[in-house]
Image: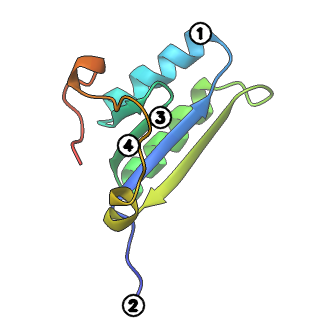
Amino acid sequence: MSTQPTFILVIYDVSDDWRRNELASALKRLGLTRVQRSAFIGPSNSALVSDVKNVCRRIIDFSTDNVQIYPLTPASYRMRVVIGKEFGPEDELSGGFIV
């Protein structure tokens, strides 16, 4: 029996400030929550994953930028190791998905 992913982790390396800010804003509008400056987490469902892919394809420069989407199970998320300050509400998390 396999465990289905419940979350998606979206990480990116976008060189241009405007594109990077646009991507972050778009991910927030889709309901994802920022967990680092270039990392967002949200609920895993096929519609959201499709929307994230479409937004990324529309915004990034394929010759310089990189976006990766990882499926996560609740167990794998709980096993994460945070070294240093963890993002919290005071770090620009307004609304979004809480895990």
How packed mark 2 is, by other alpha carbons closer than 10 Å (few <14, some 14-19, many 20 or more), is few
Picture layout, residue 80 above or below residue 51: below
Q: Which amino acid does the dot numbered 3 rest on?
A: Ala
How packed mark 1 is, by other alpha carbons closer than 10 Å (few <14, some 14-19, many 20 or more), is few
**Label tally:** 4
Quadrant for the N terminus in the image: bottom left
Of the two numbered discs 1 and 3 on the same chain, state the one appearing first in sequence: 1
- For label 2, the residue is 1
Q: Quadrant of residue 56?
A: top right
Residue at point 61%, 35% (across, down): 57
Q: Which amino acid does the dot numbered 2 rest on?
A: Met
**Secondary structure category for the residue under label 4:** strand
How packed mark 3 is, by other alpha carbons closer than 10 Å (few <14, some 14-19, many 20 or more), is some
Q: Which amino acid does the dot numbered 4 rest on?
A: Ile
Residue at point 54%, 38% (across, down): 11
Q: Are marks 1 and 4 in contact (CB under 8 Å)?
A: no
Query: For the residues marked 3 and 2, what is the alpha-carbon distance in whole angstroms?
Result: 30 Å
Query: For the residues marked 4 and 2, what is the alpha-carbon distance in whole angstroms?
Result: 25 Å
Q: Are marks 4 and 3 in contact (CB under 8 Å)?
A: yes
Residue at point 24%, 48% (across, down): 99
Query: For the residues marked 4 and 3, what is the alpha-carbon distance in whole angstroms?
Result: 7 Å
Picture layout, residue 71 above or below residue 19: below
Query: For the residues marked 1 and 4, what is the alpha-carbon distance in whole angstroms?
Result: 21 Å
Of the two numbered discs 1 and 2 on the same chain, state the one appearing first in sequence: 2
- For label 3, the residue is 39
The percent position of residue 46, horizontal first and vertical second, equals 40, 58
Of the two numbered discs 3 and 2 on the same chain, state the one appearing first in sequence: 2
**Secondary structure category for the residue under label 3:** strand
- For label 4, the residue is 41
Of the two numbered discs 1 and 4 on the same chain, state the one appearing first in sequence: 1
- For label 1, the residue is 17
Q: Are marks 1 and 2 in contact (CB under 8 Å)?
A: no
